[in-house]
Image (spheres, rainbow, N blue to C red):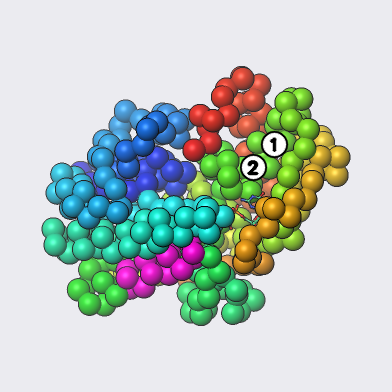
Amino acid sequence: MKKALITGVTGQDGAYLAKFLLDRGYKVYGMTARRSTASLWRLEFLGIHEQVELIEGDMGDMSSLVRAVRVSKPDEVYNLAAQSFVGTSWKQPVTTAQVSGLGVLHMLEAIRLTDPTIRFYQASTSEMFGLVQQPIQSETTPLYPRSPYGVAKLFGHWSTVNYRESFDIFACSGILFNHESPLRGIEFVTRKVTDAVARIKCGKQKELRLGNIDARRDWGYAGDYVKAMWLMIQQDKPEDYVIATGTTTTVREMCQIAFEYAGLNMEDHLVIDPELYRPAEVDILQGNPAKARERLGWRAETPLRELIRMMVDADLQRVRAGESREIFSV
Ligand code: GDD
């Protein structure tokens, strides 16, 4: 039986990946940082909370990573742990650098010192393209991060490349464009919108405050994207891949889709709040997933409209059931 260790297992991608691997017969270990309140709702939502073996660990504490690797003896490590909210990275730049940047190096070192035959996946991101240097971004597009988060991820990305080239470790990076789902945290724009739409529909909220709605993103479904992570690690050679849909949409259009689906008029509720603008913005992202399609046989299967409907439906169900919003946010 293959064994996998997933850091950040309580996050959106961690939960979907754990389910994907369990369905393929893996033994799954999930690393979580100790928090005052455990956040296992995503694993519970997918019905896998009793199948994932949790190991306490913190990306800032390399000894805890060595311990996690020793205890789990994994064939594959998926490093999904991060301070992943771009907005927060300006407020906590050092924490972001430690967790999302230096943390990657800690894990690479833990693998190198414990068992360098372990295969490693790094969750890199389209945020690294930042101020885009080419209209459509691929694996060869120069990187230009625009946030402390993007800068931290760049460090993690190049550390992964460097350990592959220096120590012959099977280390690969998935450069994933935005990917969403009903398990998305409420601070990210798609879920903020679908949650608000559900609450407005149910009479629990009147307005939705957003920042820059002219920003464009290449949004896919997280459930599709975790498969690409696994496919990368199964290849003969470790390489980096862009994972995207190939289409770009404005926040405004995405929002429109959500309101329309719920039978609401967006203009009646949307308020633009300059406070929510970011100090530096990534105006547009559009990925070219050709390499993943050709080499991995992977493609994004869920169109944005279907994804947004899925998210609105899930939020309507939560709001109607009177479930506490806090439980489903962190
Ligand atoms: N979160 C948020 N909240 N974003 C808003 C808002 C708002 O009220 N109003 C406008 N936006 C705009 C942001 O300025 C940004 O341009 C866009 O919506 C998307 O923001 P997020 O959903 O927060 O995602 P992100 O693109 O910054 O980052 C996500 O994708 C990256 C991959 O490109 C995160 O998942 C990152 O962890 C990931 O690496």
39 is higher (above) or lower (below) than 155: above
Ligand 1 has an atom within 8 Å of the beta carbon of the residue at disc 2? yes
Name the residue at 38% across, 69% down.
155
Most foreground residue, 197 or 23:
197
Label 2, residues with CA under 10 Å away: few <14, some 14-19, many ≥20: some
Judging by the rendered image, the residue that carries numbered circle 2 is: 192
State left or right for residue 272 relative to residue 2: right
**Residue 319 on image: x %, y %:** 64, 25
Judging by the rendered image, the residue that carries numbered circle 1 is: 196
Q: Which residues are magenta?
A: 148-161
**Can residue 133 be seen here?**
yes
Principal secondary structure, stretch drawn in magenta: helix
Name the residue at 21% across, 63% down.
109
Question: Could you tell me which secondary element the residue under label 1 belongs to?
Answer: helix
Cβ atoms at labels 2 and 1 below 8 Å apart: yes
Which quadrant of the rendered structure holds the N terminus?
top left
State left or right for residue 64 relative to residue 199: left
For this orientation, the residue located farthest to the top is: 321
Name the residue at 25% across, 52% down.
61
Quarter of the view holding residue 277? bottom right
Amino acid type, mark 2: Lys
Quarter of the view holding residue 246? bottom right
**Can residue 296 be seen here?**
no
Most foreground residue, 60 or 254:
60
Ligand 1 image position (quadrant): bottom right
315 is higher (above) or lower (below) than 163: above
Residue 155 magenta-highlighted: yes
Most foreground residue, 35 or 237:
35
